[in-house]
Image: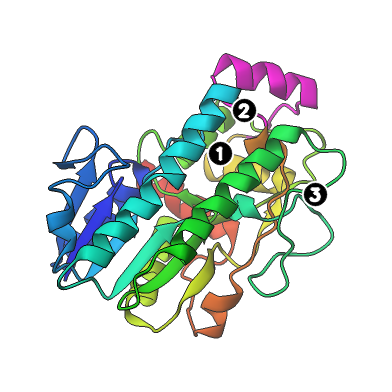
Amino acid sequence: MKIVIPGGTGQVGGVLTRAFKAAGHEVVIIGRSTGVRWDGHTLGRWADEIDGADVVINLAGRSVSCRYTAENLQQMMRSRVDSAPVVGEAIAKAANPPGVWLQMSTATIYAHRFDAANDEETGVLGGREPDVPGYWTYSVEIAKRWEAELDEADTPATRKVALRAAMVMSPDRGGVFDYLSWLARLGLGGPVAGGHQYVSWIHDDDFVRAVALLIREPIAGAVNLAAPNPVPQREFMRELRQAWHVPVGLPATSWMAEIGAFAIRSDTELLLKSRRVVPGRLLQAGFEFHFPNWREAAQNLAESRR
C-alpha cells in the first residue's frame, strides 16, 4: 500500500513508519520541515501524494508536552483543527481518493472520572466535570472540534476513523515512556496527589497492529486505542519502577507536581487527569492485545530500551 502520513515526524509517526516500511509498504511523510512540505492549513503540491494513496493517517498537531498557556492551547487548537479540513479537502479533490482516512484524536476527550471506564458506546465525554481546572475543558474542546472536522469532511468514497489514542508507549528516546522512565530511575516515580487517577496507555506493538486492523476492517467512527486494563497512577509507576529495578519512588503532592511540571515546561493535566479508557470497539472486532497488562508491557519496553 501507499500510506500518506501528514504530521508524521513525531514519536507516533516514527512508530508507524518503521512498522509499515518493514511490512513492505510505501510511506510518505508530509511535514513542516521534513518529508513533503506543507504548512498544515492550505492546499499545495503535497495534496498530489494523497491522490492515488491507499491510506491517509493524519497525525498533525502541536505536542501536548508543554505548558498549557493560552498561547500554547490556541496553537494546539489551530494545528489540529486547521489540518483536518485541509486533509479532507485534498481527499475530496482527489481523482482516486484513498479508501480510508485515519484521523488522530485523543483519549483526553473523555471525562475525568474514577467510577467507571469509558468505552466508545457508554463513555462520558469531558468538559462538564466539577472542580477541575478550566483549561482542562479547553483540551476536551480541542478533541471535540478535531473529530467534528473529520465528521464534516465531504469524502463519501473514503471511510473515516477517529483514533482516540491513549499514551503510546515505545522505547524510543524522547517519547512518553522515555520521560516516565527517566523520572522512575531518578527515584521520583511515586504516586502523585495520592495516585488514584487512572492512566490509560497502549504498547506500540499493539498500537501498530490496531491501526493495521482499522485499515483493513470496515470500521468507521471513533475508536479507542488503549490497552484494556488501565491502572491507577500509583500502580502504574510502581510497575514501571520494578521494570527498571528501582525500589522506591518519592510521592508528590499536587503543588509539588505543579513545580516539577513548570521546571520541565510541561503541565500537570498529563499527571492528574484520570483517563480510564477501554477499547470496546477493538475488542468487539476480535482484536487480541499482545500486551493487555501494564506489568508485562513495562518490562518488555524497558528490556527493549536496554
Amino acid type at circle 1 is His
Q: Disc number at residue 128? A: 3
Q: Marks 1 and 3, how far apart in space?
A: 40 Å
56 versus 181 height, above or below: below
Q: Position of residue 45 (x, y in %)?
A: 12, 48
The CA span between labels 3 and 2 is 20 Å
Going by the numbered disc 2, the residue's amino acid type is Asp
Which disc, if any, is residue 20? Answer: none
Q: Is residue 210 magenta?
A: no
**Place of residue 95 in the rendered image (x, y in percent of width and height, measured from the top left):** 15, 71
- Per the image, label 3 sits on a secondary structure element best described as loop
22 or 2, nearer to the observer: 2
Where does the image place residue 165, in percent across and percent down from the top left? 51, 57
Out of 164 and 98, give the one closest to the viewer.
98
Q: Residues within 10 Å of mark 1 (few under 14, many from 20)?
A: few
Q: Is residue 59 visible?
A: no
Question: Which residue is the site of mark 1?
Answer: 245
For label 2, the residue is: 267
Q: Residues within 10 Å of mark 3 (few under 14, many from 20)?
A: some
Q: Residue furthest right?
A: 130
Amino acid beneath label 3: Arg
Does label 1 or label 3 sit earlier along the sequence?
Answer: 3
| Left or right placement of residue 279 versus residue 257 in this view | left
Name the spot of residue 116 as percent of width and height, x first. Answer: 80, 64
* First to last magenta residue range: 247-268
